[in-house]
Image: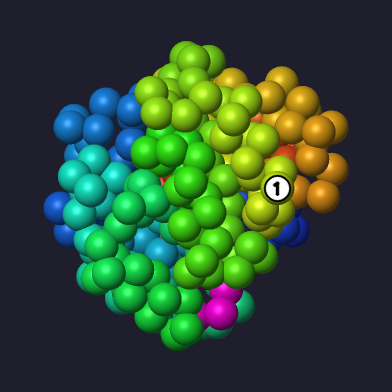
Amino acid sequence: MSENTGSWDRDFVQQYLVGVIDLRRGLAVHAIQGNRSAYAPVACVHGDAVQLARSYAAFGIRQIYIADLDAIQNQSAPSSLLNRITESLETETEFLIDIGWRGDETALAKRSIQAISERHSRVSWIAAGESAISTDALIALSEIVLASRMMVGLDYHDDTWMSTKVTESDWLEIASKYRPRGAVVLDLKAVGSGSGPYTAKRCRTLRLRFPDWQIISGGGIRDQTDARVLTEAGCQSCLVATAIHPLLNT
């Protein structure tokens, strides 16, 4: 692990932190409050996504969340960078990948998911409400990967549900039937803002409803105290980027 973990406890880093990589046009970009067109390359690695993944691992992080923003925004095939990132680290690293799963993906996109899943046994795929064209999207993903490798994405902006295609209640209802591994809860207004965690209340409610789910959330986390707010609200892991980028040895 990196010698410079700042105020972060090493055991806490290993157990609870998930490093975030947002991909856009072949680069790792710094997400700030959901304004995706303005995201700039991550400065500490000059936008090198593979190096960012390795830096997270050197810091002690064992889980990495990847959002393929080109696929999410443009409904395109997953980036070839996903292969390079997942293959760049040892097999004990766990990956959570969001490619903007809609439910009507091309055969090429489905083959890409299957190929990555076969090569790396610790990859899970996120079906996010923001991207889904209907609740059938979760069903379609279940036909490609095991439920144990599926996560439900719950996306908000300033506490408002982001999807125009599916309601929050319908999305959670269908998820309860297909028994995914858990959920990733995000409020994009908080991402990169350093304003503290927005989602603790939602995570606490979700934990009561789905006690067996792995719940992951983040956005706005400034330090370990903020992260503990989420773990105490029922999150198993916390998404971080801005708070630790200055601490990464690159």
Q: In this view, does 59 lie above or below 188?
A: below
Magenta segment boundaries in residue numbering: 120-124
Quadrant (top left, top right, bottom left, bottom right) of the C terminus: bottom left
Q: Where is residue 212 in the image (x, y as percent from the top left)?
A: 82, 50
Q: How many labels does the image show?
A: 1
- Give the residue type that dot 1 points to: Lys
Secondary structure found at label 1? helix
Residue 203 quadrant: top right
Quadrant (top left, top right, bottom left, bottom right) of the N terminus: bottom right
- Can residue 76 be seen by looking at this rendering? yes
Side of 50 where 216 appears, left or right = right
SS assignment for the magenta stretch, majority:
loop
Side of 27 where 31 appears, left or right = right
Q: Where is residue 11 in the image (x, y as percent from the top left)?
A: 74, 58
The answer to which of 195 and 207 lies nearer the viewer is 207
Q: Which residue is drawn at 55% across and 62% down?
A: 142
Q: Where is residue 210 in the image (x, y as percent from the top left)?
A: 79, 40
Q: In this view, does 149 lie above or below 84?
A: above
The answer to which of 151 and 91 lies nearer the viewer is 151
Q: Which residue is drawn at 75% across and 48% down?
A: 213
Q: Which colour scheme is used?
A: rainbow
- Can residue 64 be seen by looking at this rendering? no
Q: Residues within 10 Å of mark 1 (few under 14, many from 20)?
A: few
Side of 125 where 1 appears, left or right = right
Q: Which residue is drawn at 52% across and 24% down?
A: 167
Side of 115 where 149 appears, left or right = right
Residue tagged 1:
177
Q: Is residue 90 above or below residue 200?
A: below
Q: Does the magenta stretch include residue 210?
A: no
Q: Position of residue 130 (x, y in %)?
A: 41, 34
Q: Residue at x 18, y 30 (%)?
A: 38
The answer to which of 92 and 154 lies nearer the viewer is 154
